[in-house]
Image: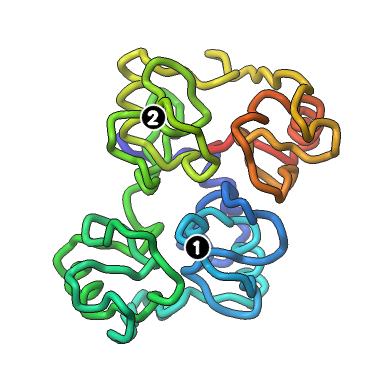
Amino acid sequence: MRILSITAALAFGLSSPALAQEINFGNDSSEWANDGECDDGRFTGKGMTATPLLEEDVLADATDCRTAYEAGTLTLLGVASDGTIDFGNDEGDWSNDDECDDMRFAGPGMTTTPLLQDDIMRDATDCRTAYEAGLLTLSGDGPDDLIIEGVNFGNDNGEWSNDGECDDPRFVGAGMTATPLLADDVLRDATDCSTAFTAGNLTLLGVDAKGGIDFGNDEGEWSNDGECDDMRFAGPGMTTTVLLYDDVMRDATDCRAAYEAGQLTLAGQ
């Protein structure tokens, strides 16, 4: 059953403006989260980064984007306050090929090729057609995160979702992929991971049945630098550098200190 976790709801802030509560800002799993600039291509305004916008940062830079949105320096790109969508034009390189290339959207009507900033609002006919056929939603407007037995599995927005292998590095067990695990797949392979979890082929890595956290050790290359590098976590206590699987459970002192200071949560909580 798909339900929105209570902790996730509280994380949006009950004191936020009404419209802000309706926007799904996602999580802080982006490589560029918590750097003071919004990297999510769904938005526009002075609060945006000046660097190229990437598909993997949609719904993955929550704190930066929420902060700028609530400060009035961001708006949703091409979406009016009443929810009306401006699909843009057909000036993109891949317009009129029957696949939507606009990274503001998600669903089976999307292309399977990499999504580029240049195609935002430039594939109008393809995206409008798929949207009106029920094959697309605005990213973040789809079903709530999949939660089973108190575990938030997230969504299926990962590049490797629905391939029969779990790619979310928060888990361990026979149901995991044998390929390298990436921070981009945290909370983005819900069906694969939940299927393996309910079959008894996965457990949460370093988290016991009562929610107790094993922070691991300090054997990581970046341990004891005052920033958490363990991709199992999210929040302002995280490093802003690229997260590597080699650092999972190997930055204990930094991550424990930030967690106990309220600067981190387990990703998905």
Front-lying residue, 31 or 88? 31
Front-lying residue, 16 or 201? 201
The vertical placement of 156 against 63, above or below, is above
Graded by Cα atoms within 10 Å as few (under 14), some (14 to 19) or many (20 or more), the crowding at tag 1 reads: some
Give the residue pinned by disc 2. 166
Q: Residue at x 60, y 18 (%)?
A: 206
Graded by Cα atoms within 10 Å as few (under 14), some (14 to 19) or many (20 or more), the crowding at tag 2 reads: many
Q: Amino acid at mark 2?
A: Cys
Dot 2: element: loop
Point out the image quarter for the N terminus: top left
Instruction: Answer left or right for 261 relative to 73.
Output: right
The vertical placement of 65 against 245, above or below, is below
- Tell me the tag on residue 90: none
Q: Residue at x 62, y 71 (%)?
A: 51
Disc 2 to disc 1, C-alpha distance: 23 Å
Mark count = 2
Q: Residue furthest left?
A: 133
Instruction: Answer left or right for 216 relative to 193.
Output: right
Q: Quadrant of residue 66?
A: bottom right
The vertical placement of 141 against 195, above or below, is below
The percent position of residue 152, horizontal first and vertical second, equals 45, 34
Instruction: Answer left or right for 148 relative to 29.
Output: left
Q: Residue at x 42, y 68 (%)?
A: 116
The percent position of residue 71, horizontal first and vertical second, equals 67, 72
Give the residue pinned by disc 1. 54
Front-lying residue, 221 or 174? 221
The percent position of residue 228, horizontal first and vertical second, equals 74, 37
Coloration mode: rainbow
Front-lying residue, 99 or 85? 99
Q: Residue at x 78, y 35 (%)?
A: 222
